[in-house]
Image (cartoon, rainbow, N blue to C red):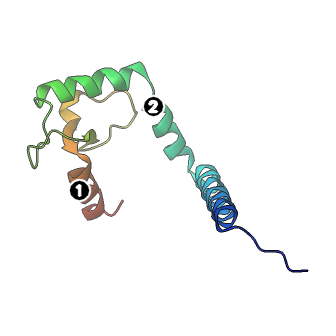
C-alpha cells in the first residue's frame, strides 16, 4: 500500500525545517559575538544611548544626512569613544538604513 503526502503537509514540514535552521543560525551567531560586540549591543539598550540617539535625530531634522530620506532612520557612530557612553551627539549622524549599510560596507564592517 502506497502512502501519499499531501502537498500542504509537505510545505508545512519544509517551512518548519527552514525556520529551525534559521533559529539555529541566529543562536550560533549570537554566541560568536565578541565581548566588545556584546557590550555594544547592551549599550544600545541604555537610557544614555536612547537620549543621544534622540538628540542626533532631532538635530538632523529626522532626515538622512546623505540622501535626505525620512524612512528607516538609524543613528550611526562616525567614530567611537574610548568608552561607550562618553560620546556626544557630535560623534553621531543620522542615516537611513540603505545609506547606513553603504557606509558600513565601504568601511569594511
> Which residue matches tag 2?
43
Residue under the point 44% across and 24% down: 46
Name the quadrant of the N terminus. Answer: bottom right
Q: Nearer the viewer, residue 15 or 43?
A: 15
Residue under the point 46% across and 39% down: 40
Whether residue 24 is situated above or below residue 89 in the rendered picture: below
Residue under the point 68% across and 67% down: 10
Pinpoint residue 34: horizontal percent, then vertical percent. 56, 50
- Judge from the rendering whether residue 66 lies leftward or rightward of residue 46; answer left or right: left
Res 79 quadrant in image: top left
Res 45 quadrant in image: top left
Q: CA distance from mark 1 to mark 2?
A: 21 Å
Q: Residues within 10 Å of mark 2 (few under 14, many from 20)?
A: some
- Judge from the rendering whether residue 40 lies leftward or rightward of residue 66; answer left or right: right
Whether residue 49 is situated above or below residue 32 in the rendered picture: above
Pinpoint residue 94: horizontal percent, then vertical percent. 19, 38
> Which residue matches tag 1?
103
Q: Nearer the viewer, residue 4 or 99?
A: 4
Name the quadrant of the C terminus. Answer: bottom left
Residue under the point 59% across and 49% down: 30
Amino acid at each position: 500500500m502506497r502512502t501519499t503526502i499531501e502537498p500542504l503537509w509537505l510545505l508545512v514540514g519544509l517551512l518548519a525545517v527552514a525556520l529551525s535552521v534559521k533559529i539555529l543560525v541566529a543562536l550560533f551567531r549570537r554566541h560568536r559575538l565578541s565581548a566588545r560586540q556584546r557590550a555594544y549591543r547592551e549599550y544600545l539598550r541604555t537610557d544614555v544611548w536612547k537620549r543621544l540617539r534622540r538628540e542626533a535625530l532631532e538635530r538632523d531634522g529626522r532626515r538622512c544626512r546623505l540622501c535626505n530620506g525620512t524612512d528607516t532612520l538609524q543613528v550611526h557612530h562616525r567614530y567611537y569613544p574610548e568608552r561607550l557612553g562618553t560620546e556626544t551627539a557630535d560623534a553621531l549622524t543620522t542615516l537611513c538604513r540603505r545609506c547606513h549599510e553603504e557606509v558600513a560596507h565601504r568601511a569594511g564592517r
